[in-house]
Image (cartoon, grey):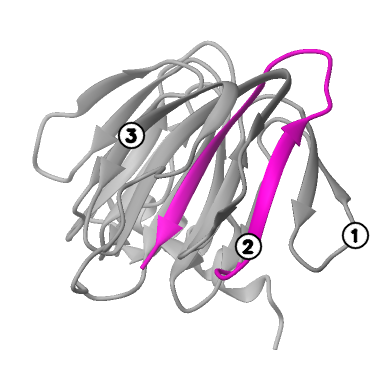
Amino acid sequence: MNSALPAICALLAVAVGSARGGLIAPVDISDEPHHTVLVQNAAIRVFRLRLQPGEATVPHRHRNLYAYLSLRSATIANEVQGRSPVIVNLDGGEVHTSKGGFTLAERNKSSEPADLLVIEALKADEVGFTTPIGGFRFHDAALGELFQFPVMRAYTMIIAADGRTEKHEENYDRLIIAISDLKLREDAAGQSPSQLQMKAGEVKWFPRGVTHTTTNLGASPATFITIECE
């Protein structure tokens, strides 16, 4: 099946709706042509949303809890049919969450391109996390909690050059979002040391169960966000 077909259909829906002056039928976020899927599994879907100045998405459904992160400063208008737009000013690296359950379109009100990540939880409410967020020791580093829900939680971490975490076990699946360029050494139990290199804005999924330490090999602080999934 042609993978471009959903996007083409979404764009046709916009054209037909505009021509008729009527309401535009909403699509699932996965069919919205400005959203590109980066990660999809049983726990989450991760999309990258790019909008040029003045450009808007097709109205789309957010069915579940989700978080969104702007990779650069941006002003976004959240447009719901029949209501006044809600304007949100976002700083680069700023994280917001929403419980979902609605349909909207997003419009870039900035004079520069907007670049966002959208992380949608796919599981229904679980019992919740049984260990504290973070919960490990570190040196020349800082950790800050961002949010916590029963199915998904997140923290941000800054590790100075040569800073490190102490050995700890990852009890949950996790998504790493690079806020700065990363050059990290991973020392995992039973494995040879490895390097994790990521550019700012990139994401990577890691399954639970590894016991490891992380050291910043870069010459400047490494900043990243970890989203854990139950």
Residue 209 belongs to the span the image colors magenta: yes
Which residue occupies 62% across, 48% down? 167
Residue occupied by mark 2: 206
In terms of sequence position, does the residue under pointer 1 or pointer 3 come before the other? Answer: 3
In terms of sequence position, does the residue under pointer 3 or pointer 2 come before the other? Answer: 3
* Distance from Cα at disc 3 to Cα at disc 2: 19 Å
Label 2 with label 1: CB-CB less than 8 Å = no
- In the image, residue 168 sits, relative to residue 218, either above or below, namely below
Kind of residue at disc 1? Ser
Secondary-structure class at tag 2: strand
Q: Is residue 50 visible?
A: yes
Tell me where the magenta segment starts and ends, as one range. Answer: 207-230
- In the image, residue 199 sits, relative to residue 190, either above or below, namely above
Secondary-structure class at tag 3: strand
Residue 179 belongs to the span the image colors magenta: no
Kind of residue at disc 2? Phe
Residue occupied by mark 3: 146
Number of the front mark, 1 or 3:
1
